[in-house]
Image (cartoon, helix red, strand yellow):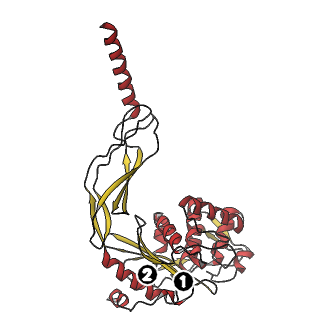
């Protein structure tokens, strides 16, 4: 009932604030469902911590213990109220980072992983480049205002889709509460308490950035990501956008089981690669004009074994990508090459006999 109450709220225009932007995407394909000014570079406040958490998770196990420095304890802005000299596990600090937006946790984690926040920001930029965030740059791990620290709604949605693939990240950001060192941390993301199926992700605010919010909701097999930057009434805006876009989206079978051969030579050997399961994708507005394309390297080596991933099948509804699936080698290239070599020698022998 609470979910129904929230989604019936009237939409609140995000563009009431100058330079505001928003976007809604489908998580698995990256399909853009709607947006406005989604490629304008804007400050991101504490939504920065999505990248902070992802980089930390890729460089730690979570069990390491971190001693809190005076610098981290004294940092300005939102905190989980760490004290200098205390020690916490990385996992504890990640909970403080993502649930209560602790800038002290962000600084402590950044210094633990990279030695300084400046060096950690370089790791964040490196990860942004790997993901393909062309309009995102980081200067710190917390999201405090800084020249050259910016992103776009589009890039934040793309980053969030990647981050949610990390199981620990996904588990932390959907927590409503978490106990750390005898304290109960309550997630600042109100949508977790208001919308059924909400799975995160991160709030943010500074005077310069305005209210920033990244959220994700799962419903009937579909996961949508919503990003608003500089939106005064972001809770209501996200709720109304989810109501509108889930009405448009449906998970459907877009490709039946079939085998797809790659038109490429494997070190002079076979054309291999197969795809043997049904593909499901998100279809909008009931439209279905399905086609597929194959992404593959220019060549593969003879060491390819049966079961190795040798390409990617991309399924489109019209011009919109709605699903991606791996293509697997259906045979060993080396074994094929041996048979091919034996066959050539046999043919040569028979020709000489003629």
**Occupied quadrant, residue 50:** bottom right
Query: Whole-percent x and y of residue 305?
Result: 40, 38
**Occupied quadrant, residue 1:** bottom left
Horizontal side of residue 237 vs 45, given as left or right: left
Q: Is residue 206 above or below residue 25?
A: below
Q: Is residue 279 above or below residue 83?
A: above
Q: Is residue 20 above or below residue 61?
A: below
Query: Whole-percent x and y of residue 128?
Result: 58, 63
Looking at the image, can residue 62 be seen?
no
Horizontal side of residue 174 vs 316, given as left or right: right
Furthest-left residue in view?
A: 256
Horizontal side of residue 60 vs 276, given as left or right: right
Residue drawn 61% across the image and 83% down it: 209
> In terms of sequence position, does the residue under pointer 1 or pointer 2 come before the other?
1
Residue drawn 39% across the image and 85% down it: 240
Q: Secondary structure at mark 1?
A: loop
Which dot, 1 or 2, sits closer to the camera?
1
Query: Whole-percent x and y of residue 346?
Result: 33, 16
According to the picture, the residue beneath numbered tag 1 turns out to be: 20
> Whole-Å distance between the Cαs marked 1 and 2?
23 Å
Query: Whole-percent x and y of residue 333?
Result: 39, 34
Residue drawn 36% across the image and 30% down it: 336
Furthest-top residue in view?
A: 353
Q: Secondary structure at mark 2?
A: helix
- Residue nearer the viewer, 271 or 310: 271
Looking at the image, can residue 147 be seen?
yes
Density class for disc 2 (Cα within 10 Å; few <14, some 14-19, many ≥20) is many
Say the numbered circle drawn on residue 299: none
According to the picture, the residue beneath numbered tag 2 turns out to be: 192
């Amino acid at each position: 009932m609470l979910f129904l109450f929230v989604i019936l709220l009237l939409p609140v225009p995000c563009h009431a604030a100058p330079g505001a932007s928003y976007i809604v995407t489908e998580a698995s394909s990256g399909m853009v469902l709607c947006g406005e000014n989604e490629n304008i570079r804007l400050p991101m406040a504490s939504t920065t911590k999505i990248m902070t958490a992802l980089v930390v998770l890729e460089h730690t196990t979570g069990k390491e213990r971190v001693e809190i420095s005076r610098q981290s304890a004294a940092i300005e802005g939102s905190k989980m109220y760490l004290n200098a000299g205390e020690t916490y596990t990385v996992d504890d600090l990640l909970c403080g980072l993502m649930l209560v937006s602790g800038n002290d946790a962000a600084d402590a984690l950044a210094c633990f992983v990279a030695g300084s926040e400046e060096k950690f920001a370089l790791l964040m930029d490196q990860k942004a480049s790997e993901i393909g965030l062309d309009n995102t740059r980081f200067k710190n791990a917390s999201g405090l205002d800084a020249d050259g620290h910016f992103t776009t709604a589009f890039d934040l949605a793309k980053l969030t889709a990647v981050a949610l693939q990390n199981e620990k990240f996904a588990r932390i950001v959907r927590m409503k509460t978490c106990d750390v060192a005898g304290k109960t941390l309550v997630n600042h993301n109100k949508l977790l308490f208001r919308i059924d199926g909400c799975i995160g992700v991160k709030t943010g605010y500074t005077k310069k950035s305005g209210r920033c919010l990244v959220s994700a909701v799962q419903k009937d097999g579909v996961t949508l990501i919503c990003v608003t930057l500089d939106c005064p009434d972001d809770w209501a805006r996200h709720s109304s956008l989810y109501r509108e876009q889930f009405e448009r989206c449906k998970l459907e079978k877009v490709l039946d089981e079939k085998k797809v051969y790659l038109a490429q030579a494997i070190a002079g050997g076979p054309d291999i690669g197969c795809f043997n399961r049904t593909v499901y994708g998100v279809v909008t507005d009931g439209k279905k004009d399905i086609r597929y394309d194959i992404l593959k390297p220019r060549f593969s080596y003879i060491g390819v074994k049966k079961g190795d991933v040798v390409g990617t099948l991309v399924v489109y509804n019209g011009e919109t990508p709605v699903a991606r699936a791996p293509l697997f080698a259906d045979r060993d290239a080396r074994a094929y090459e041996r048979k091919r070599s034996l066959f050539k020698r046999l043919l040569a022998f028979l020709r000489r006999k003629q």
